[in-house]
Image (cartoon, grey):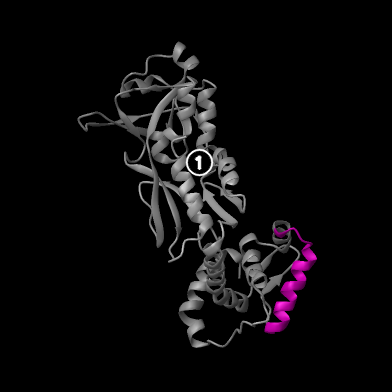
């Protein structure tokens, strides 16, 4: 069984086999919390070597711990070859059992610490590549100074991760709304603008009305709506569906910003990404007086975390800090 198939298999296991054979896999009291989370980390990272690098230990020690668990359980958890590693059926069943246990143990530890101590521990934070780089990273120095006992693991990628499977404490999602069984809180509204560098505008045709974009080669994002037409809405709620075209298609959004700064053409970018460039006069807003978007006019940055009764202090601290720093 491939590690990438774990989620689907675990669903089958927990709904059928786990109930029909509740004593197939026993979890020994002699196994400590690190042993339990080790199996989850191997599945998440895909190899002993990757887990060893994350934990700062020798890869052979990871193998010894796994071998010890397999000996105690009398089952083989992983099928290993020189090229790949896969969960066995017993391994997937074991993972299905320990996942809620480790979550409860971590929650109990956080609750106990929260009574008399400041936020601490490792905070696993997820966001898109550009939002993480341009919004979160510049604010980490202030957060780390305020909460020196909290370590940060930032997973910045345009791939949407599974908060539970990837053990994410807090995610920031950019969308009109967020679906799923999560706790969701709005960080801030986001709006788009058509912008271009002052050097580009000095020599290009005017960009005053939506139809003017037809005279320009825009810098485009690869998503279908972003690269084919932009929507403009005036004060009377009249919407114009304006076709756009261009020779440069880039991802992520930070690359589009850099291209706009280099004078390669107009671009459609979110306000949180270009606020500083507008203030410094490096970029200028075009087609003023109109709202603009590629999808929907109502979108936001959302704080998302797994639904549970207790919010760890480290998560609450980051939520409060980002909300306080959103207009910086």
Picture residue at 53% right of the left edge, 27% below the top: 259
Tally of marks? 1
The answer to whether residue 101 is left or right of residue 180 is right
Residue under numbered circle 1 = 131
Residue that protrudes farthest toward the front in the picture: 116
Q: Nearer the viewer, residue 107 or 255?
A: 107
Picture residue at 37% right of the left edge, 18% below the top: 207
Residue 47: quadrant of the picture: bottom right
Residue that protrudes farthest toward the left in the picture: 236
Is residue 178 visible to us here? yes
Give the residues in magenta. 55-74
Check residue 67 for magenta coloring.
yes
Picture residue at 46% right of the left edge, 78% below the top: 15
Q: Nearer the viewer, residue 49 or 181?
A: 181
Picture residue at 34% right of the left edge, 20% below the top: 212
Predominant secondary structure, magenta span: helix
Quadrant that contains the N terminus: bottom right
Is residue 169 visible to us here? no
Relative to 250, residue 204 above or below:
above
Residue 83: quadrant of the picture: bottom right
Crowd tier of the residue under label 1, counting other residues whose Cα lies within 10 Å: few below 14, some 14–19, many 20 or above = many
């Amino acid at each position: 069984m491939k590690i990438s198939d774990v989620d689907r298999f675990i669903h089958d296991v927990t709904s059928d086999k786990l109930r029909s054979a509740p004593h197939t896999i026993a979890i020994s009291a002699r196994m400590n919390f690190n042993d339990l989370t080790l199996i989850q980390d191997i599945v998440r990272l895909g190899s002993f070597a990757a887990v060893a690098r994350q934990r700062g230990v020798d890869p052979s020690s990871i193998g010894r711990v796994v071998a010890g668990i397999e000996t105690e359980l009398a089952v083989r958890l992983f099928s290993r070859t020189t090229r790949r590693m896969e969960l066995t059926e017993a391994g997937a069943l074991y993972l299905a059992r320990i996942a809620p246990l480790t979550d409860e143990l971590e929650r109990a530890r956080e609750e106990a610490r929260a009574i008399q101590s400041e936020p601490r521990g490792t905070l696993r934070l997820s966001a898109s590549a550009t939002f993480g780089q341009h919004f979160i990273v510049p604010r980490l120095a202030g957060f780390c100074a305020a909460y020196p006992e909290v370590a940060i693991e930032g997973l910045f990628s345009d791939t949407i991760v599974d908060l539970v499977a990837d053990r994410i404490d807090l995610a920031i999602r950019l969308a009109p709304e967020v679906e799923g069984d999560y706790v969701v809180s709005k960080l801030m509204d986001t709006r788009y603008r058509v912008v271009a560098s002052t050097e580009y505008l000095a020599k290009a045709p005017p960009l005053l009305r939506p139809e003017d974009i037809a005279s320009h080669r825009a810098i485009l994002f690869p998503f279908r709506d972003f690269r084919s037409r932009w929507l403009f809405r005036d004060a009377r709620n009249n919407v114009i569906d304006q076709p756009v075209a261009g020779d440069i298609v880039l991802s992520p959004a930070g690359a589009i910003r850099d291209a706009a700064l280099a004078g390669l053409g107009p671009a459609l970018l979110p306000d949180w990404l270009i606020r500083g460039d507008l203030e410094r006069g490096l970029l200028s807003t075009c087609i003023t007086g109109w709202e603009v978007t590629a999808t929907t006019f109502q979108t936001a940055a959302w704080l998302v975390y797994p639904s549970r009764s207790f919010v760890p202090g480290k998560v609450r601290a980051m939520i409060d800090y980002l909300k306080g720093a959103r207009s910086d």
